[in-house]
Amino acid sequence: MKVKILSVLKAKPFGYVSGEALSKNLKVSRTAIWKCINELKREGYSIEASSRKGYRLMDTPDMLCHDELVTGWDGKVLGTDFIVLDSVDSTNNYAKKLASEGCREGTVVLAENQTAGRGRLGREWVSPKGSCIFLSVILKPQIAPSRVPVVTLAAAVSVVKVIEQMTGFRAGIKWPNDVVLGGRKVCGILTEMNSEIDRVNYMVLGVGLNISVQETDFPEDIRSKAASLLTYARNEGLSFQVLKRNDIIKMLLSRLEEFYGYIEAENTLPVIEEWKKYSVTLGSEIKLLWKGKECNGLAMDVTEDGNLLVRFEDGTLHEIVSGEISIRGMLGYV
Ligand code: BTN
């Protein structure tokens, strides 16, 4: 019922909805409405009550909240279930366990805090509590395992598009899926999969996006390489309106759902084309570890499977499937 009340109040931003209208609409007593409103207030919603005019929603809390997430959510594949945790070792670990127990595709695991967040290539992912998004979504795509990297690229494209939509900031994507703002990493994506030779049983797509982290809240060793939307705006002297994380999550999932639809229909082109628009990799001189050797080259293109085509210094062309690159002129290239 709280969810329904929230929907009605949200449909009239800053406008009053009378207790009578709510009780008629939801077919419950006005006392029941009043009790729910008080519960919502205790959860951090700012709701003004006037005996003459009714209730109006003034502000919502920036806490991950199941009710907020399901309110107005009309995703068909993603967000079939939202699991909101206060603290967990890693949302990816939690999601993998659920997936192995056979949960529905589209289940989303979120946490305010991760005590052992994991990054790519066995690294740790450290971001402070309450000011980031830690999200893992369980997918069961009916595609060849070799196509799974495109889903990860789609997640990176979804992130840059959401950042652009809500702040106007133009983030870039460093192959394969680091999202960077002002040369610093603002979002990382960790995809893990359970598959057979020719089919994917499930995959867990984990996204860590730094929203309002203060510079000094990043561990010292990554401070010069990490960004949040807030630190970027401060450093660039820009302003933006910070949206609530629940809303950002819904924007992100709905973008991702659109791209996921193309991938499941065996059409990776729209994802690859969008990825290229935001790429900070293509056309750059890069360094990478290849067969145990450090190599220099020029990033030429990405394939329809999301692999990177690199022209090495000796003129040979190679398709890079995984790993990490550094880009000349960007933090980390030494
Ligand atoms: C990277 O190294 O760039 C990937 C970082 C991925 C971090 C996210 S946060 C949510 C999810 N849970 C994890 O433990 N990792 C991913």
Image (cartoon, rainbow, N blue to C red):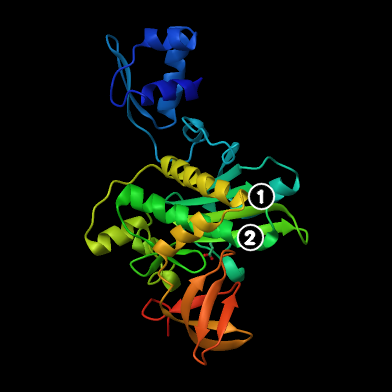
Is 251 positioned to the left or the right of 145 in the image?
left
- Residue 128 position in % (x across, y down): 46, 56
| Three-letter code, disc 2 | Arg
Q: Earlier in the sequence, mark 2 or mark 1?
A: 1
Picture quarter with the C terminus: bottom left
- Which secondary structure, mark 1? loop
Residue 57 lies in what quarter of the image? top left
Q: Check the image and report above or below for 3 versus 272.
A: above
Is 235 positioned to the left or the right of 89 in the image?
left
- Residues at circles 2 and 1 in contact by the CB criterion of under 8 Å: yes
Q: Check the image and report above or below for 331 versus 228.
A: below
Q: Check the image and report above or below for 264 versus 289.
A: above
> For the residue carrying disc 2, how many other residues have a C-alpha within 10 Å: few (<14), some (14-19), or many (20+)?
many
Real-space Cα separation, disc 2 to disc 1, in angstroms:
10 Å
| Three-letter code, disc 1 | Pro
Q: Which label sits on residue 147?
A: 2
- Residue 237 position in % (x across, y down): 21, 60
Question: In this view of the protein, can residue 58 be seen by the observer?
Answer: yes
Which residue appears at 40% of the width and 50% of the height?
162
Camera-side residue of 39 and 30 = 30
Which residue appears at 68% of the width and 58% of the height?
193
Find the residue positioned furthest to the right: 196
- Residue beneath label 1, please? 141
Question: In this view of the protein, can residue 210 be seen by the observer?
Answer: no
Camera-side residue of 124 and 165 = 165
